[in-house]
Image (cartoon, rainbow, N blue to C red):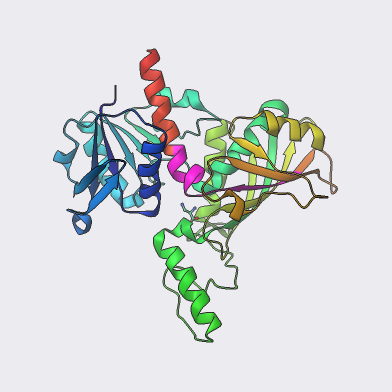
Amino acid sequence: MYETIALVGATGAVGRIVLDQLVQRQFPYKRLKLLASQRSVGTEIRVGDETIKVELLEPSAFKGVDLVIASTPDEVSAEFAQWAVDAGAVVVDESAYWRMDPSVPLVVPEVNPEAVKHHSGIIASPNCSTTQMVVALAPLHKAAVVKRVVVSTYQATSGAGIAGNEELRDSVRRSLAGQTHPPKTFAHPIAFNLIPQIGSEKQDGYTSEEMKMVYETRKILGDDSIQVCPTCVRVPVMIGHSESILVETERPLTAMEATELFRGAEGITVVDDLAAKQYPMPRDCDGKDDVFVGRIRHDISGPNGIAFWCVSDNLRKGAATNAIQIAELLVRNAANA
Ligand code: 2RA
């Protein structure tokens, strides 16, 4: 069993939610260690009824640790994950570093829970924009085989961490005061603006964030033939990524069939009544764990297409919740072994 667990990256935007969720979901553990870089060592963090001091992230910190949940930059994960595995721990990692490694399962528990069984010590959790999309695509794929996806994202500033939200607040204040303000976290001022670039230029005019949506979707759905054309956009919203998705399936689906498939799928809440002005919006999804789907309609431009709108809390299902669900899956599988 996983008696001693460690959280790496407890002071970040996602780490804080992981701690809340460990308590709220009554995750079974006996001891919790919080690990971080030198800068945060000694910081005291309240977790449920306990106050825990942050310890230094170093190889010896993993002695006796059974399970690690980590939300760190890629380069940190590249270094510490092997320390944890060498000490005998299983790592659930939210960084991008391990996701496309063939020996590392990339898991969304509602979509490919069986993949978690084939790990060699590290299990990756996908990028937030991919996670909510594959939760929505999975029931359509199972019923009608997804061939092609055209997706535009509207991604919240918290996707860039605590600094992203601070920059949005600052940018709004300074814009309203008529002050120029050179951006730091984003490439351009974010207030009253949209920035059609997330990540660095990667290939053929697509960004790293966009190519994550291509490759991670194929790996999670287990089908390398799925074609994905993404455009990722940063928007001045603090929490909740939104996505406009057009999906083409091998077998045609009506909008009603697609709606029923969404309704029957684990982890999806349908909010879809255009006449009553009911559809998912980031403000309503903030703090919730589900993926919300609405505006479900057939593609009026061609056959075999379904268009829909998808919103999810990027810090929860897009990050912390998915990691905790993977950990819960490990605990269930161990109990059933
Ligand atoms: C973002 N998807 O929104 C990224 C975070 N992993 O910037």
Residue 251 versus residue 126 in the image, above or below: above
107 to 299, vertically: above or below: above
Relative to the observer, which residue lies in front, 57 or 335?
335
Outermost residue, left side: 60
User: Total label count?
Assistant: 0
In the rendered image, residue 193, in percent from the top left (x then y), is placed at: 59, 72
Q: Residue at x 46, y 35 (%)?
A: 106
Residue at the image position 25 percent from the left and 29 percent from the top: 30
Q: Quadrant of residue 273?
A: top right
Give the image location of residue 29, x and y in percent.
29, 29
Q: Is residue 269 left or right of residue 278?
A: left
Name the residue rendered at 58%, 34% in the picture.
267
Q: In terms of depth relative to the viewer, which is nearer, 151 or 42?
A: 42
Percent x, y of residue 152:
65, 54
Give yes or no for residue 67 being in the magenta stretch.
Answer: no
- Quarter of the image for the N terminus: give it: top left
Give the magenta part as a residue range: 307-322
Q: Is residue 128 left or right of residue 12?
A: right
The quadrant in which residue 121 appears is: top left
Q: In the rendered image, is residue 105 in sight?
A: no
**Which quarter of the rendering shows the C terminus?**
top left
> Residue 10: image x %, image y %?
31, 48
Q: Is residue 86 above or below residue 161?
A: above
- Residue with the most extreme front position: 49
**Residue 29 in sight here:** yes
